[in-house]
Amino acid sequence: MKKLTHDQISENRSSLDSLHKVKRLPVYVILNSIRSNYNVGSIFRTSDGAMIEKLYLCGYTPHPPKKEIMKTALGATESVNWEYVEDPKEVILKLKKEGIKIGALELTENSFPHYNLKADSLPLAIIIGNEISGVSQELLDLCDFSIEIPQYGIKQSLNVAVAYGVTIFDLRKMFDLI
């Protein structure tokens, strides 16, 4: 086995000019009041890898062109459709009007494992909340469902960017199998 060079890997990747040909994952992601520039940058990069439909940055979530975001995103701020909207409720209500189901990545009394989402859930929007306080009750009240990532250790959750990555790539796998 021989490791591929950067040039060899790049030969098989989309370019900014060819992104319109790529089949996007019909998932909208709403980041609400994420604190860390690095988490936001990581989420941008993961969003590019999964080729999501759109990323909404809401509340006090930092947004480009902050240097920490740009460093972690490695150019993904150019390939991911994104928009800053201060009030996440505005985005949620707009997407609901368009018939998009809204879910939260949050532990609730009715949350179910993320891998139990079905293909007929798509298109959908996922709300990702603050690293400490999660998704607010006010936003949960607007959701159609909540999903969780089962935890087997002593911690209650994963890092927000890691949790997003686990969830979005399981959704990408499901979408690719349709």
Image (cartoon, rainbow, N blue to C red):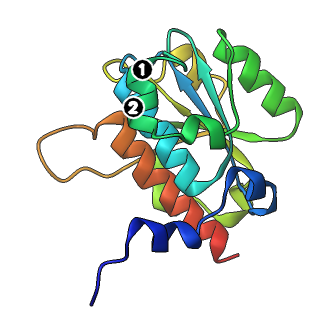
Q: Which residue is mark 1?
A: 67
Q: Amino acid at mark 2?
A: Lys
Kindly tell me whether residue 134 is visible in this rendering: no
Kindly tell me whether residue 67 is visible in this rendering: yes
Q: Residue at x 57, y 56 (%)?
A: 50
Residue placed most toward the observer, 20 or 88: 20
Residue placed most toward the observer, 78 or 98: 78
The quadrant where residue 118 appears? bottom right
Q: Are marks 2 and 1 in contact (CB under 8 Å)?
A: yes
State left or right for residue 101 relative to residue 149. Answer: right
At which x and y percent is residue 163? 37, 44
State left or right for residue 161 relative to residue 27. Answer: left
Q: Residue at x 57, y 71 (%)?
A: 11
Residue found farthest to the right: 98
Mark 2 is surrounded, within 10 Å at the Cα level, by few (under 14), some (14 to 19) or many (20 or more) other residues, namely: some
Q: Which residue is mark 2?
A: 71
Q: Amino acid at mark 1?
A: Lys
Specify the quadrant that holds the C terminus. bottom right
* Residue 14 disc label: none
Q: CA distance from mark 2 to mark 1?
A: 6 Å
Residue found farthest to the left: 154
Please, what secondary structure does the residue beneath circle 2 have?
helix
At which x and y percent is residue 141? 61, 22
Q: Is residue 67 above or below residue 164?
A: above
Q: Is residue 51 above or below residue 136?
A: below
Q: Residue at x 38, y 16 (%)?
A: 35
